[in-house]
Image (tube, helix red, strand yellow):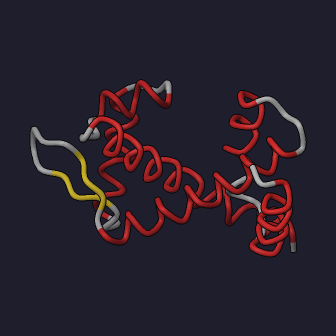
Amino acid sequence: MSFKKVRNAHKTENTEDYLELISELLTIKGEARIVDIANRLGIAQATANKTIQRLQHQGFIKREPYRSIFLSVKGQKIASHSKKRHNTVFKFLLNLGLDEKTASADAEGIEHHVSDKTLKKMNKFNAKKNV
């Protein structure tokens, strides 16, 4: 059963990462461009563009030629949910005593695979630690 859960998480991981990154770029820079996405992910622009096209076809983003990339309502919901999960895991790892760099790197992988039940426990732990 757990193998199935992991495989399903892997299917959505890439989408969640892209949507979360686009949301972050829109917040910080006011725009999300292919070049910025590719640079942040350390991938070729062609690779980023291919994924952006897929996300557009799936209805997660809106895009016009020569303009920035924007999240649809559907994309915003997933990005927000993913960011909340990331923040919970990140704070939990900090509360365990990990440094920010390690906690950030580890949270990036864990956020996609942690159950809602575990997230609730992490939130309770974080509230007690107040970080």
Determine whether, in the image, residue 38 is placed left or right of residue 112. Answer: left
- Which residue is painted at 86% across and 68% down in the image? 2
In the rendered image, residue 129, in percent from the top left (x then y), is placed at 84, 54
- Classify 122 as above or below 93: below
- Classify 20 as above or below 37: below
The quadrant in which the N terminus is found is bottom right
Residue 98 occupies quadrant: top right
Of 26 and 52, which appears nearest the observer?
A: 26
In the rendered image, residue 72, in percent from the top left (x then y), is placed at 28, 65
Counting the numbered discs, the total is: 0
Determine whether, in the image, residue 33 is placed left or right of residue 87. Answer: left
Determine whether, in the image, residue 97 is placed left or right of residue 32. Answer: right
Of 96 and 85, which appears nearest the observer?
A: 96
Residue 118 occupies quadrant: bottom right
- Classify 93 as above or below 126: above
- Which residue is painted at 49% across and 31% down in the image? 41
Of 98 and 18, which appears nearest the observer?
A: 98
In the rendered image, residue 93, in percent from the top left (x then y), is placed at 81, 44
- Classify 19 as above or below 43: below
- Which residue is painted at 64% across and 52% down in the image? 87
